[in-house]
Every structure is written in structure tokens, then in C-alpha cells.
Amino acid sequence: MDMRLVPGLAVLVLVAVLYVLAFRKAKRSRTAAALGFILLSGLILRAYLSSDRYVHDWDERYHALVAKNLIRHPLKPTLYDQPVLPFDARNWGGNHVWLHKQPVPLWTMAASLAVFGINEIALRLPSLLLSTLAIGLTFLIGRHLFSHKIGLLAAFLHSIHGMVIELTAGRVATDHIDLFFLVFIELAVFIAVVSWKRKSVAWDILSGVAVGLAILSKWLPALIVVPLWLILRWKGWNWKILGRLALLLFTIALVVVPWQVYISARFPREASLEQVFNYRHITEALDGHSGRLTYHFEVMRRSYGELIFLPVLWLLLMFFRNLRSRRRLFLLVWILVPFLFFSFVKTKMQAYTVFAAPALFLLTAEFFYYIKRTAKKWRPRWLPAVCLLLLIALPVRYSVDRLMFFRYRPLTPAWVTGIKGLKNKLPAKTVIFNHARPIEVMFYTDYVAYQRPPSREEVALVRQKGYAVAVVDGRGLDPFWRKEKGIILLEYR
């Protein structure tokens, strides 16, 4: 056996033991203890995949750099904090003021970096904690809407979900942004469920704040919470429900609008360009992220297990049998509205629908217990046992594959060691050209970096602004720069 796999296999064995303990506690109706083991297991899985000592390509490195820069000026998000050379404001991967994402995740990561230092663990710590909190929220929603048993099984499915864990670890595109988005939407949904039962206006205000934070994490799809809120309360239009809906929407606006007004006034060109770019996602496949109309349903199959369409069809059938079922309609809207909407959006990315994940966990858990209750009516007799097994085994298989327990992954690649080794080795004001990873250079050091080789005019401009010039040797570098006086040649490692 490859000894490099031992840490991963040890984690796999540990969480397997913890999940067995959770199952035993649940069987004895010790719900709090069972949930505790599930939360601990989910935290361990997230910490394990978050242990890479480098920032990932898409999109974590950009979020990391902007968060680092926000420490110095929280109200001015920047990518190239010192734009030594001219830049194109339309290029979100190389501009100065960076409004490509809403600010709440970036502010939170900046706060963590300010407290714990500029490192990968500090960067991921907020996502790690929020992602674990979301497991508990799934349980609480399940308990309020259905039962403790359904809540626990849904929490288990949430805790092992491969895509959610990868987002937490920053390993896949949209990473921490979509993780924050998921958590705040789920928090808003939980508060809406509690306010439905307790009939308190204060809970509606809290739900509005959570929706506002979700919008300030990504954008307007967070408004999915509003129809969910209405479904729980609907008794026909009356002044009471109109007043509480107005209060909810007013609270959301109170949280969201100030930042939009601020950036439009402070950075009008960048804000306008970013707004147009956001809408282009609907009509164009941006950055090569295209896909078929069925793309998100294919993602559903891969992410939640190939059997997931069975509970979805069952939900539709149960709803049409009883059109007055609030709980069924609640889950149906939470699942189908995002999947159908993003199916018609031209830009396709797997995490776009992840905020519907808790609803799919709850649906799977409810369907699981429905099969258990009705197993004696099934023919052939072995079919319910197979369905029950696959409803759990397929998501587990997917999770094991995503977490790479049986594949070696280097925690600290050579390139990141090389970049970190540059720190304090060059003059404080240095511009590095021809580096394959300029964003990472600017995160790990205080130098300015560009991917392209320099032109003579650019070197003259850089020197005129008081910066030293360093060039990475290789990758088709013009031999002129190897002989030019005052140029610091760097070896790329």
C-alpha cells in the first residue's frame, strides 16, 4: 500500500466509526448525541479536504487575493491593489477595483486573514465553520417540517455531500461564494419555518436579514426564500400577510441596497460593467461554461446519486394527490425553481443550484422513511431493501470519490513553495513578469505580478514609478532580458 494514503484512509475509518455511533444513538432516540456525531464527522471531512497548503485555481485564488487586499481598505475591493500597468476594467481576472462578487464572503475571509494571518487555513476557516453549521440547519428544518428521524438522515446526507465539501475547501469553481450563499439561504429558510410556527414578526425581520446577507454573498436567486415564506403562511391575501411580506422585503432591501448605492456612486464604471456582465450569464455561455438544457439535472444525478429522480417523481405525485400540502409544495418550489431557472441560463456551472441541496437531502430522507413504512406493499419483496440501500450508498460513493481517500494529493506543491520562498527576497517594491501564477504571487507576497513577459515600454514605466523589475526566466523569454542591466532574473520552480 502507498503509505502516502494512510492519512486519508485514517480519516475515512474515523468518520465511518463516528457515523456508526450516530446511527446507534439515533436508533435509541438519543437525537442530540446522534446529531453531535454527524456534525463532528462533517467537520472532520471538511477539515481534511481543506488542508491543502495552496490556494486553488478556480476561483479561490482570486477571492483570496481580494480578501487580503480588503484588510487594508474594507470598502474598496481590489484585485491588483497597485495597478502599476494599465488594465482593462472589463477583465475581472486582471483589473483593479474588483466588484465581480458581492462583499460578505470576502469581508468575512478578510477578517479571518487579519486575525490568523495570510494563509490558506485562515482563508477557509469561515467556510469550514459555516458549512458545518449548515448541517445543523438541515436537521432543524427537517425536525420542524417532518420529524427528528428525517432531520437526522438529511443532516447525514448533507454532512457527506461531495460538492458542498469541495466548495468548503475551495477546490471547485465559485467555492466559498456559493458556500456562503447556500448557508445564508438555508438560515433564512430555517428562520422562516420557525416564524411560521411562532407567528412572531421579529423572526420575519431576521429572515429578511439572512436573505439580504445571501444576496450580498452572490445575488438575487436568494429571493427563492420569499415564495417559500409565502407558501408556509398562505391563507389568501389579507392585510396581515401583506404587511408582513412588506416588512420582509423592506428588511431585505435595507440590508442589500446600501452597498449597491455605494459602489454605483464610488465606482460607477466598474459597477455598471459588472451589472451588465451578470445579466450576460443568462444570454451567453461566459468563460466557456456552456452545457445542454439538461445540464443541471445531469449534475443532480451525479451529485445526489443516480436514484435521486425517484424521490423527485414521488414528491410530484404526492403533491398532485394533495394540492394543499404546504410541506410538499415547499420542497417542490425549493428544488424545481432553481433547477428549471438555471437550465435556461446559458452559462452553466455545477454549483449554481447547490442552494437547493438541503431540500434534496430532506426529500431523500422523507422518501427513505416512506419506503420503510410501505415496504410490505412492494413487489417484488426485495425491491424496497435495494432502494433503501442505494439511496444511501450512491451518495456515499460519490462523497468518497470526491474526497479522494484512495488517491494521493500533495498538500504543498513545489510551485507554492517556490512562491513563498520569494517573500522578502526581493526589494519591497518589485514587479514580477512572466510568472505562471501571478495571482498566487500577490496573495503570498506583497509584490505585483503579471503572467506575460514585459515589453521595453512596460519596464520603463515600472521603473519610472519606482519599482524594481524581476522576470522569470523561461517560457519563451526574449534573451534581451537576460542581458539587460538591473533586471532580476528568477528561476521558476
Image: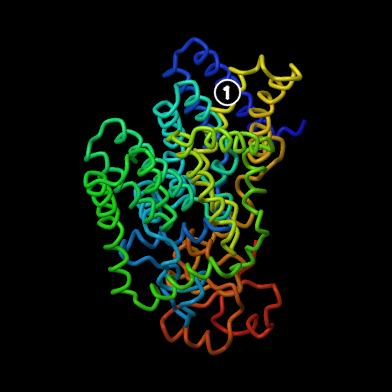
Q: Vertically, is 432 above or below 397?
A: below
Left or right of residue 12, residue 143 in this image: left
Q: Residues within 10 Å of mark 1 (few under 14, many from 20)?
A: few
What SS does tag 1 mark? helix
Q: Percent from the top left, x then y, of residue 272? A: 40, 75
**Could you tell me the amino acid type at mark 1?**
Tyr
Which residue is drawn at the image coordinates 32% and 66% (left, top)?
260
Tell me where residue 315 appears, x and y as whole percent. Answer: 56, 35
Seen in the picture, residue 252 relative to 377 is either above or below; the reply is below
Foreground of the two, 65 or 138:
138
Front-lying residue, 404 or 226: 226
Q: Nearer the viewer, residue 423 or 322?
A: 322
Could you say which quadrant of the image residue 196 lies in? top left
Image coords of residue 228 (percent x, y): 40, 43
Left or right, 224 with respect to 6, comes to: left
Residue to which mark 1 is pinned: 370
Image coordinates for residue 465, horizontal then vertical, percent: 41, 83
Q: Nearer the viewer, residue 204 or 54?
A: 204
In the image, residue 121 sits, relative to residue 365, either above or below, namely below
The tally of labels here is: 1
Q: Which quadrant does the C terminus fall into?
A: bottom right
Instruction: Assign the N terminus to one quadrant of the image.
Output: top right
Q: How is the image coloured?
A: rainbow
